[in-house]
Image: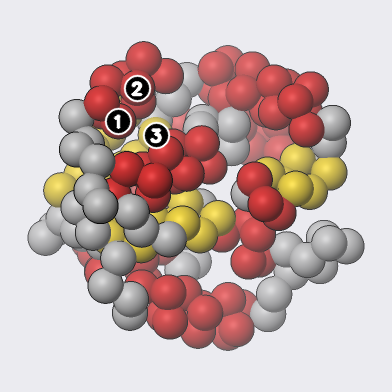
Amino acid sequence: MDRIAIIGCGGSGKTTLGRQLAERINAPVTHLDGVYYDSDWNTLPPEKFAALQEELVAEPRWVIDGNFASTLPIRLKRADTVVFLDIPPIVCLWGILQRRRRYRGGQHTEQGVFDRIHWGFIRYILGFRRQMRPKVRALIAEHAGHARVVTITSRRAARRFLATVPPQT
């Protein structure tokens, strides 16, 4: 595993798993929320966001976490491993509540945490499996046929998966 794309609902554990995998395989990690949003929650223009990802995936080793379906093909085409965190919505909601408590809200770029909880985000989490999961699966099937695809459905399964990744130096 040299190029890992991590996808999943908000609160599913993408950032945590991304950091842990990057440490295990000795690769840089990029949290796409940290690239997309600035400190005032302004977004990067779409063409700049896509260009930046093209640069990131051109590197020989990386871990990138984030959804952003519009640019997901960029990451999927170059990834040798795709990790899809297909975690139940209630667990994701619990994850964002824990994150809110731990980081006290706001943005924490060094942790890759972008905690902006609002009703739209909660609706997104509750509807992720119904609305986004089919789109994500279709994009994976279309652009990542060459890659190892790992679907993780629980926190315990994420820990088990991480335990199978040998540390690299």
Residue under numbered circle 2: 159
Q: Quadrant of residue 38?
A: bottom right
| Amino acid at the residue labelled 3 | Leu
The numbered mark, 2 or 3, whose residue comes first in the sequence reads 3
Q: Position of residue 153 (x, y in %)?
A: 35, 23
Pick the front one: 130 or 117: 117
Residue under numbered circle 1: 162
The residue that appears at 44% across and 25% down in the rendered structure is 87
Query: Which element type, helix, strand or loop, lies under badge 3?
Result: strand
Question: Callout 3: 10 Å neighbours few (<14), some, many (20+)?
Answer: many
The residue that appears at 84% across and 31% down in the rendered structure is 104
Q: Position of residue 139 (x, y in %)?
A: 31, 57
Pick the front one: 75 or 29: 29
Query: Which element type, helix, strand or loop, lies under badge 1?
Result: helix
Q: Residue 85, which numbered label? A: 3
Q: Are the residues at dot 2 and dot 1 in contact (C-beta closer than 8 Å)?
A: yes
Q: Quadrant of residue 159?
A: top left
As drawn, 168 above or below 43? above
Residue 54 left/right relative to 3? right
Q: Position of residue 45 (x, y in %)?
A: 68, 80
| Amino acid at the residue labelled 2 | Arg
Pick the front one: 25 or 66: 25
| Real-space CA distance between mark 2 and mark 3, rounded to the nearest whole angstrom | 12 Å
As drawn, 8 above or below 32? above
**Disc 2 vs disc 3: which is toward the camera?**
2
**Disc 1 vs disc 3: which is toward the camera?**
1
Q: Position of residue 168 (x, y in %)?
A: 23, 48
| Amino acid at the residue labelled 1 | Leu
The numbered mark, 1 or 3, whose residue comes first in the sequence reads 3
Q: Are the residues at dot 1 and dot 3 in contact (C-beta closer than 8 Å)?
A: no
Q: Is residue 81 visible?
A: no
| Real-space CA distance between mark 2 and mark 1, rounded to the nearest whole angstrom | 5 Å
